[in-house]
Image (cartoon, rainbow, N blue to C red):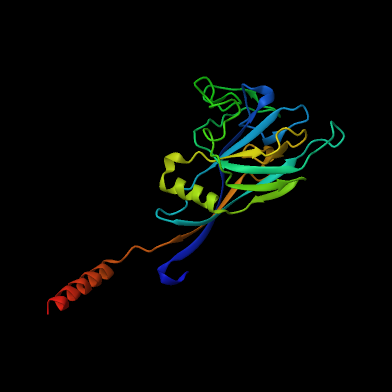
């Protein structure tokens, strides 16, 4: 509990939808397999997307912080094509809708209508502004958070004013909640690609994307409190007239 009648709370929610888009198979969907982002050892790029349900956060909440946790489950083989390259990965707020899909296998499978692919955010009907999603049109120009990724393990994209603002915006206007896209900042380098835990992870042994939100609540004024304020206001008016 905070002073001034404010109450503070923190909630952690897993992704409710996630998928990846892969340049190597432009019309495949990866919604039923692990997430992948970065550039593989054959120069093919990929980006991951995930969205969170904020329904557990009360209406009127004021977001004070937000952070995302991801788990790297696999990195490039060190004995092939120079091995893994460590690099920065950034989260950006998505500006448009996309279809999760159920494409499986390591690099996905043929997309169904409405699925996200490298070419389309909804396969068969709605392309990205540019293949692979375009910064400034398909997702925000400014990164919400950036983290340096190296080996297998857990990573945190820490809270920032931008990320807290993203979540606040989704709370205030749920129809704009399209989630985040994970983009590697060195897509021209071989071996930056990483596999991340997803909601479709076999066996559920690796955690999916997790969003932790800190917020405060301002209690609604009681009827008695409003009555006292009204009486105080009327008293002030009368005193001024005397």
Quarter placement of the C terminus = bottom left
Q: How many marks?
A: 0
In depth, the one of 107 and 151 nearer the eye is 151
- Residue farthest right in this picture: 79
Q: Position of residue 94 (x, y in %)?
A: 53, 38
Which quarter of the figure has residue 3? bottom left
Q: Using the rendered view, name the quadrant where residue 240 is placed.
A: bottom left
Instruction: Report the residue at 57% width, 53% height from top.
Output: 160
State the residue at coordinates (57%, 34%).
135
Q: Residue furthest left?
A: 242
Check the image and name the residue furthest to the top: 124
Image-based side of 185 in relation to 179, left or right: right
Q: x%, y% of residue 154?
A: 70, 49
Q: Is residue 4 toward the left or the right of residue 225 in the image?
A: right
- Residue at 46% across / 61% down in the picture? 216
- Residue 178 place in picture, x, y as percent: 50, 38
Quarter of the image for residue 229 reads bottom left
Is the residue 87 above or below the residue 106 in the image?
A: below
Estimate the x, y position of residue 49 in percent, counting from the top left: 59, 37
Q: Compared with residue 29, is residue 186 higher up or lower down, i.e. above or below?
A: below
């Amino acid at each position: 509990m905070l002073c001034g009648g404010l109450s503070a709370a923190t909630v952690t929610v897993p992704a409710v939808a996630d998928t990846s888009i892969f340049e190597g198979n432009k019309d495949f969907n990866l919604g039923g397999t692990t997430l992948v982002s970065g550039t593989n050892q054959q120069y093919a790029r990929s980006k991951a997307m995930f969205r969170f349900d904020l329904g557990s956060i009360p209406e009127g909440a004021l977001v004070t912080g937000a952070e995302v946790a991801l788990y790297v489950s696999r990195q490039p083989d060190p004995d092939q094509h120079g091995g893994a390259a460590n690099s920065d990965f950034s989260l950006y707020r998505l500006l448009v809708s996309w279809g999760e899909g159920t494409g499986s296998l390591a690099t996905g499978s043929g997309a169904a209508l409405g699925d996200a692919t490298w070419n389309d955010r909804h396969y068969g009907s709605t392309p990205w502004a540019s293949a692979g999603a375009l910064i400034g049109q398909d997702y925000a120009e400014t990164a919400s958070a950036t983290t340096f990724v190296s080996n297998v393990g857990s990573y945190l994209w820490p809270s920032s004013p931008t990320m807290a603002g993203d979540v606040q915006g989704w709370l205030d206007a749920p129809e704009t909640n399209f989630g985040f896209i994970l983009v590697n900042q060195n897509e021209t380098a071989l071996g930056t690609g990483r596999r991340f835990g997803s909601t479709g992870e076999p066996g559920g042994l690796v955690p999916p994307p997790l969003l932790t939100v800190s917020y405060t609540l301002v209690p609604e004024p009681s009827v008695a409190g409003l009555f006292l304020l009204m009486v105080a206001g009327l008293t002030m008016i009368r005193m001024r007239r005397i």
